[in-house]
Image (cartoon, grey):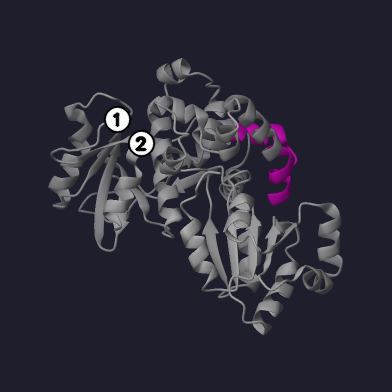
Amino acid sequence: MIQREISALVAKRATQLPVVAILGPRQSGKTTLARTLFNNHRYVSLEELDTQRFATEDPRRFLELYQNPHGIILDEFQRVPSLLSYIQTYVDTHDLKGYFILTGSQNFLMMEAVSQTLAGRVALCTLLPCSTSELSHANLLAPTLDEAILRGSYPRPLVHNLDPSDWCQDYIMTYLERDVRLVKNIIDLSTFKRFVQLCAGRVGQLLNLSSLATESGITVPTAKQWLSVLQASYLIFLVQPHFRNFNKRLVKTPKLYFYDTALLCTLLGIETASQLGTHYSRGSIVESYVMSDLYKQLLNRGRNNQLYFWRDSVGHEIDCILERADTLVPLEIKAGKTVVSDFFTGITFWQQLTGMRDAFVVYAGDQTQKREPATLVSWREIDTIIKQVFS
């Protein structure tokens, strides 16, 4: 089993609140994590139709039947969202910390249900596919960045040495046929798949909804709704521009990234390292890999909404801004292995503009070293940045 860095956070929250919800995409390891951390809890899968029916038709008896002194794990609980009302009643009458452990794959349904019934009673923890540091500790990290990008970060294909392209094709088809229909009743799946592929072609770019809608053959409101579906099912995430002005007109449009680069490459038709090496989007794919890993590191430590980018109206840009209290730490992402002076151009401009000195450059090489004006960090050691900034 891959040791998940979020384990300490989940275990801690279970000592504080009666309900812990582990959210995340399908196949990210939520069930394994829950059953490992809470091995004395009674496990119930709501994927099974007869169990779903039982929980829907007689929720009180359902909870009574599965109760035990330690607690209950309800896997894929969004299948029976009505059960939350009865969980609320139960936890309000029984002072039991960490009794209900909920897992679910659709953030939209989870959050909608939780916000109505379990506010103040539930700890929300997001488990994304594996981080670079988790794979490194499990001896599953690829020898090069390009290979790591192609392998992706989902546990199953890595642990079982499955062909990532084949696995991703199956994952995408399952996602389209099951999860999309569940989150939003999208009938035209072929158009939706084209929309997803067009999003892949825009990775690392400023989001232009009008252009995306036109090329997909849909309206702008539909494009906005479909983007929310991709976010809710943990396929993509948007990084917002930082709002601090520094006397410059700023870009106010978010950037689009994918959580997993193997899925991203599959959508782009990239199957080999040689194809990736010459692909026009390689720089943006590398950027997506690093941004996703930074996001995982933050979530594993219980931190949210501290990842931004910065860009002014004349093109000066910082790929990533980490916000810590009133301090902003810039980070540039470079796809090359050989260090050149251009790696530090954006950082130098930022430091002259703001007077802030701490900065990082993540690149495809293997050496991490102090440089002027920024610390150069290997793609293998992205976690060290989060440890330094948020220690």
Depth check: 324 or 337 in front? 337
Left or right: where does residue 167 sit relative to residue 288? right
> Residue at 25% across / 51% down in the picture?
329
Quadrant occupied by the N terminus: top right
Residue 380, label in figure: 2
Q: Residues within 10 Å of mark 1 (few under 14, many from 20)?
A: some
Q: Is residue 364 left or right of residue 168?
A: left
Residue 59: image quadrant is: bottom right
Residue occupying image coordinates x 73% and y 45%? 181
241 sits to left or right of 102: left
Q: Which residue appears at 51% of the width and 33% of the height?
A: 152
Crowdedness near tag 2: few (<14), some (14–19) or many (≥20) residues, C-alpha within 10 Å:
many
Magenta stretch: residue 51 in it?
no
Query: What kind of element bears circle 2?
Result: helix
Q: Judge whether residue 180 is colored magenta.
A: yes
What's the CA distance linking mark 2 and mark 1?
Answer: 7 Å
Q: Position of residue 307 (x, y in %)?
A: 37, 51
Instruction: Reply above or below: 65 against 76.
Output: below
Secondary structure under badge 1?
Answer: loop
Residue 244 is drawn in which quadrant?
A: bottom left
Amino acid beneath label 1: Asp
Q: What residue did someone put label 1 on? A: 366
The amino acid on which the numbered mark 2 sits, given as a three-letter code, is Arg
* Picture coordinates of residue 269, whole percent (x, y): 56, 22
Picture coordinates of residue 10 (x, y %)? 52, 61
The quarter in which the C terminus is drawn is bottom left
Circle 2/circle 1 CB separation < 8 Å: yes
Q: Is residue 246 visible?
A: yes
* 33 is higher (above) or lower (below) than 71: above
State which region is magenta.
Answer: 176-196
Whole-percent x, y for residue 349 in the image = 17, 41
